Image (tube, rainbow, N blue to C red):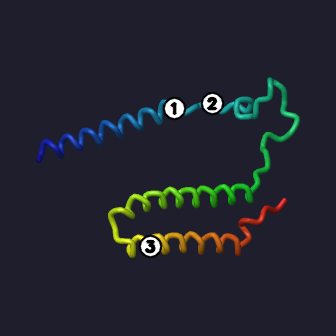
Amino acid sequence: MIIMQNLAIITFLLSLSIMMLTTLMSKKMIIDREKSSPFECGFDPKTSARIPFSLQFFLIAMIFLIFDVEITLLLPLVITMKITSIMTFTCVTSIFISILLIGLYHEWNQGALNWAY
C-alpha cells in the first residue's frame, strides 16, 4: 500500500516537472512584429487577413453536429430491440425522438434555421 502511494507521488512529481520544463523551454522571449503579422509572399497584405465569420453558419453547423450525434445515439436502439420488450423499446424510442423534435421546433421557433444574408 505504501509502495503504491510512493509510486503515485513519484509519478505525479515527474509528470509535473516535465510539464514545467517544457513550458519554460517553449516560451519565446523575443516578440517580432514581422513574425506575428500575416504572411503574403513577402509583401504587405493588400486586404485584411481577418475574414469576417458568419455567425449564422456557425449556428447551423452546431445544430447539425448536435443532431448528428443524436442520430448516432439512435442507431444502438435497433440492437436493443432484440433484448428488451416491444413496449419498453417503443417508449424509449418515442421519448428520445420527441425530445429531438421538441429541440428542432425550438430552434425553428427561435429563427436559428433561417439563413439570413
Q: Residues within 10 Å of mark 3 (few under 14, many from 20)?
A: few
Give the amino acid at mark 3: Thr
SS at badge 3: helix
Report which residue position mark 1 lands on. Answer: 26
Quadrant assignment, res 105 = bottom right
Report which residue position mark 3 lands on. Answer: 90
Mark carried by residue 91: none
Residue closer to the observer: 42 or 33: 42
Q: Relative to residue 80, is residue 32 drawn left or right?
A: right
Give the amino acid at mark 2: Ile
Compared with 10, 99 (above or below) is below
Residue closer to the observer: 56 or 94: 94
Question: Are discs 2 and 1 less than 8 Å apart at CB?
Answer: no
- Residue 68 pos. (x, y %): 57, 56
Q: Residues within 10 Å of mark 2 (few under 14, many from 20)?
A: few
In the picture, the quarter occupied by the C terminus is: bottom right
Report which residue position mark 2 lands on. Answer: 30
- Residue 14 pos. (x, y %): 31, 36
Give the amino acid at mark 1: Ser
